[in-house]
Amino acid sequence: MDHPGADPRPLIDILQRNGLLVAALPALEGGLDLGLVPQRNSLLAEVLMTIGRGSLPMGRLFEGHVNALDLIHRFGDGEQMRRAAADVREGCLFGVWATDDPSRPLRMTAEGRLEGRKILASGAGRLLRPLVTATTEEGVRLIAPRLRPGERSEVRSWTASGMQVSATGSVDFTGMMTREADRIGPPGCYQKEPYFTGGAWRFLAVQCGGVEELVQLMRHHLRRLDRDGDPHQRRRLGECMVAAETARLWVRKAALVYGSAEEETVLAYVQLSRHAVERAALDVLERVQRSIGLQAFLRPSPVERVARDLATYLRQPGPDRALDNAAALAFAAEQAGWP
Ligand SMILES: Cc1cc2nc3c(=O)[nH]c(=O)nc-3n(C[C@H](O)[C@H](O)[C@H](O)COP(=O)(O)OP(=O)(O)OC[C@H]3O[C@@H](n4cnc5c(N)ncnc54)[C@H](O)[C@@H]3O)c2cc1C
């Protein structure tokens, strides 16, 4: 499954078989409210970390599913939520495709016709219920098109070294007609804060799982080779455990803050969390590769795959801006400190 053009369907099937697709639905629709109510954020953090430990591409797909259903629940009407829930119960994975092809960004005409293309769209060809952002005269709208397997998509452009089975390809919507019922919420709802920026805590939780997995793989490797008595290896393992726990603590608190704190605190805390988790992951990657050596680069070793997936998945939008924004909010705040 770890090759260019790999089919993510087996990952979606695992999510479905284990009840995770449905868990992201409201309780009224038979779900667990996972990702929909603040009281479930701690549970969601643990679920995302656990999935991330097993498979970062699966975590990416599930994180997008949770994000999309949260947007429909928050901004959609009752009928849109019921329709989405019926699709989820049928095994449909949802996701959010917001990244535009810079040369052909997605637009919607006044008649409801889509023109343009999404890129970096996880699950392309297999994810049949995306939410896509489209520019209109009224502002950015959130649209819920319905796709058939393979329709309008291509994954050849997904040549990243890691996260290959996430099928993060492109989808051309040109010519597709949308109806009023396909439009979720008012113009601009997708970027409503603190959900837009604050929701980043979910991908951090998945990344955190990948960090934990790497540390465990390193520990097993060194024990197997009887290298666990060496003081240099012990020091690096200790440093990795500190980094992994740091990431976990930031993620767990970000999950709590996201559901309960003032908007500015959420924005500052989650954007700082991005820096903390990225730093921890990079520290772990460096130490794991140094400790294991060349073996960490030989396929098909799990260390090689997880390191490649993590390094790729760490690349999320605007990391410099996130830290800068958080620091600016801290300077502007009346009081220092966190809730
Ligand atoms: C595995 C994977 C799956 C994905 N799936 C999806 C998906 O399903 N849907 C979706 O919409 N997107 C998806 N994305 C895309 C993702 O949301 C981001 O758009 C993408 O990862 C941005 O990465 P980047 O490194 O190019 O970011 P950039 O923001 O371009 O950052 C690169 C560097 O440039 C700096 N920088 C950013 N802006 C500026 C500027 N104006 N001036 C100077 N420097 C700047 C940054 O701080 C950073 O150092 C996915 C990405 C990955 C890796």
Image (cartoon, rainbow, N blue to C red):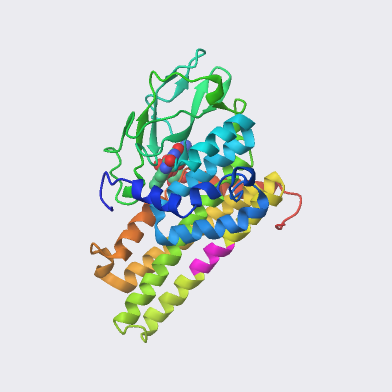
**Viewed as shown, does residue 311 lie left or right of 317?**
left
Residue 334 pos. (x, y %) = 76, 50
Q: Quadrant of ligand 1?
A: top left
Q: Is residue 200 left or right of residue 9?
A: right
Residue 246 painted magenta: yes
Disc tally is 0
Say which quarter of the image contains residue 292: bottom left
Residue 129 lies in quadrant: top left
Q: Let me know if residue 92 is in the magenta part.
A: no
**In terms of image quadrants, where is residue 124?**
top left
Residue at 24% x, 68% y is: 294
Expressed as whole percent of the image width and height from the top left, the position of residue 331 reads 68, 49
Question: Closer to the camera, 132 or 99?
Answer: 132
Q: Position of residue 226 (x, y in %)?
A: 31, 85
Residue situated in front as seen by the camera: 200 or 268: 200
Q: Does 122 appear above or below 3?
A: above
Q: Taking 252 as reference, is 78 above or below it?
A: above
First to last magenta residue range: 243-249
